[in-house]
Image (spheres, helix red, strand yellow):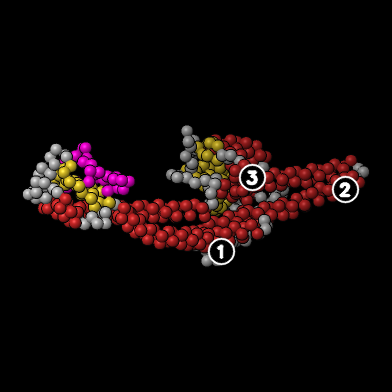
């Protein structure tokens, strides 16, 4: 049975009280049935005793006159009108007693007692039908008026039902009170959430809460902590972005003001070149910020993942960056030891990650250096290594280069977001990135991406 649109209190009351009510009614019915059963047993014993006494009186009596009838009445103790009798011969003719006691049509008299119910003069009787043991041609019927039995049984039932009803009422009261007491921490939690300001993301503190509600409170606190961390991350991102954009925009404004006051064509061209450089740096910074924002976990639902071939992505982007490497006099190579590398991910983010790694290597190693992009695999992961033979990075800085806007060198047009983007994208694909030393010198950016099963 599924309950909808009902409160938790109503559901608990229904499932706690309804079975109790059903069991109480069933118990009362069973008690009444047992009481009637034992009362009928007592009546049956009395009827058998009366029938045996009548059989002895009419033994060897061919005729039953008024005197014998009086003795029979005295024997069955019918002064209180509880018992009446009738005696029939073998032809079912009444020879003594009350004619109102009818013989059953579907039963032939036997030596064994036979009991049945009959209504006589508007009163219900229990009737015994039995052949006389001494004179088998005579059938004796003794009927017992059940009015007193019914009154007795009703009194017993009422004397039991009234305390039982009071017990049910007390049970309902205590169950209602207990449910209210048990739901009080839930009401407290509801009140705390309703009175809390939207900016308040501090953990919830419940006093004397049950284990089940503590689990809910822990889940809510985890959600609040995650939300607070996400908001703090966005605030830091906005603050860092505003700080980083302020410098190139201020420089761009200054260069344009100087260009507007410049009179000579040569000076104007020089100022415009500086404006172009500042604008290019600003565009690069904005693009990096947008890529970083897309790669954060909070934006995961907005960028879909598709089936792709990681090996093809590595080969293609390496080929695309060869002209830039040649212009910088860098030897760029690609070693794919995996022919096909099926992966479920976001191709745009993965391309951005590997382009950042290769461009950083090209930018920061000396001329006539070499950069190698290597793709291998193990049982569970794809491994991409971007190795160069440059000066490398000291161990003290290997963790800091993943921080946003951190730059080891202040020269060039970098904005300090490349490695932060690489880490975010790798973690977005359940992977990891690590900086290792190359032999005899240089740096290896070690990226591990777990394999994913492709559903066909």
Work out how far the residue at label 1 is from the one at label 2, CA to CA, in angstroms: 64 Å
Q: Quadrant of the N terminus?
A: top left
Q: Which residues are magenta?
A: 98-125
Residue on which the image places disc 2? 258
Magenta span dominant secondary structure: loop
The structure residue drawn at horizontal position 48% and vertical position 54%, both measured from the top left corner, is 13
> Which of the two residues, 161 or 383, is positioned nearer the viewer here?
161
Q: Are marks 1 and 2 in contact (CB under 8 Å)?
A: no
| Label 2 vs 3, first from the N-terminus | 2
Residue on which the image places disc 1? 206
> Which of the two residues, 217 or 246, is positioned nearer the viewer here?
217
| Label 1 vs 2, first from the N-terminus | 1
Front position among marks 1 and 2: 1
The residue furthest left is 60
Q: Secondary structure at mark 2?
A: helix
Residue on which the image places disc 3? 294
Residue 113 part of the magenta-drawn span? yes
Is any atom of residue 40 visible in this view?
Answer: no
The residue furthest front is 66
Q: Are marks 1 and 3 in contact (CB under 8 Å)?
A: no
The structure residue drawn at horizontal position 81% and vertical position 44%, both measured from the top left corner, is 275
Image coords of residue 351 (percent x, y):
60, 40
Work out how far the residue at label 1 is from the one at label 3, CA to CA, in angstroms: 37 Å
| Label 1 vs 3, first from the N-terminus | 1
Image coords of residue 98 (percent x, y):
22, 46
């Amino acid at each position: 049975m599924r309950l909808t649109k009902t409160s938790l209190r109503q559901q608990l009351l229904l499932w706690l009280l309804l079975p109790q009510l059903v069991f109480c009614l069933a118990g009362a019915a069973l008690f009444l049935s047992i009481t009637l059963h034992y009362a009928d047993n007592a009546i049956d014993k009395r009827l058998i005793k009366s029938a045996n006494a009548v059989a002895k009186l009419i033994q060897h009596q061919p005729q039953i006159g008024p005197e014998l009838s009086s003795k029979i009445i005295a024997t069955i103790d019918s002064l209180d009108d509880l018992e009446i009798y009738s005696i029939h011969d073998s032809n079912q003719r009444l020879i003594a007693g009350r004619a109102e006691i009818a013989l059953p049509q579907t039963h032939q008299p036997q030596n064994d007692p036979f009991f049945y119910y009959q209504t006589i003069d508007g009163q219900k009787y229990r009737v015994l039908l039995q052949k006389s043991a001494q004179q088998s041609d005579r059938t004796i019927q003794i009927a017992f008026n059940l009015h007193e039995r019914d009154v007795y049984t009703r009194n017993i039932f009422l004397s039991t039902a009234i305390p039982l009803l009071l017990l049910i009422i007390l049970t309902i009261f205590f169950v209602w009170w207990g449910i209210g007491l048990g739901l009080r921490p839930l009401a407290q939690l509801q009140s705390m959430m309703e009175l809390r300001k939207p900016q308040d993301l501090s953990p919830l503190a419940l006093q004397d809460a049950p284990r089940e509600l503590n689990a809910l409170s822990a889940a809510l606190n985890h959600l609040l902590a995650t939300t607070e961390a996400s908001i703090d991350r966005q605030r830091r991102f906005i603050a860092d972005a505003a700080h980083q954009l302020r410098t190139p925009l201020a420089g761009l404004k200054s260069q344009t003001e100087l260009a507007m006051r410049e009179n000579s064509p040569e000076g104007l061209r020089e100022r415009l070149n500086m404006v172009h450089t500042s604008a290019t740096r600003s565009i690069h910074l904005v693009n990096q910020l947008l890529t970083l924002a897309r790669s954060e976990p909070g934006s995961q639902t907005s960028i879909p993942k598709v089936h792709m071939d990681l090996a093809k992505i590595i080969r293609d982007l390496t080929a695309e960056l060869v002209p830039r490497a040649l212009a910088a006099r860098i030897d760029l190579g690609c070693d794919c030891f995996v022919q096909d590398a099926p992966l479920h991910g976001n191709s745009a983010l993965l391309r951005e990650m590997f382009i950042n790694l290769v461009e950083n290597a090209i930018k920061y190693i000396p001329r006539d250096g070499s950069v190698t992009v290597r793709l291998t695999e193990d049982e569970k992961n794809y491994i991409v290594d971007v190795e160069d033979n440059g000066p490398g990075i000291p161990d003290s800085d290997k963790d800091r280069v993943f921080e946003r806007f951190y730059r080891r060198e202040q020269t060039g047009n970098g904005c300090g977001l490349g490695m932060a983007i690489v880490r975010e994208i790798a973690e977005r694909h359940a992977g990891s990135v690590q900086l290792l030393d190359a032999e005899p010198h240089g740096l290896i950016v070690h990226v591990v991406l777990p394999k994913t099963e492709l559903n066909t």
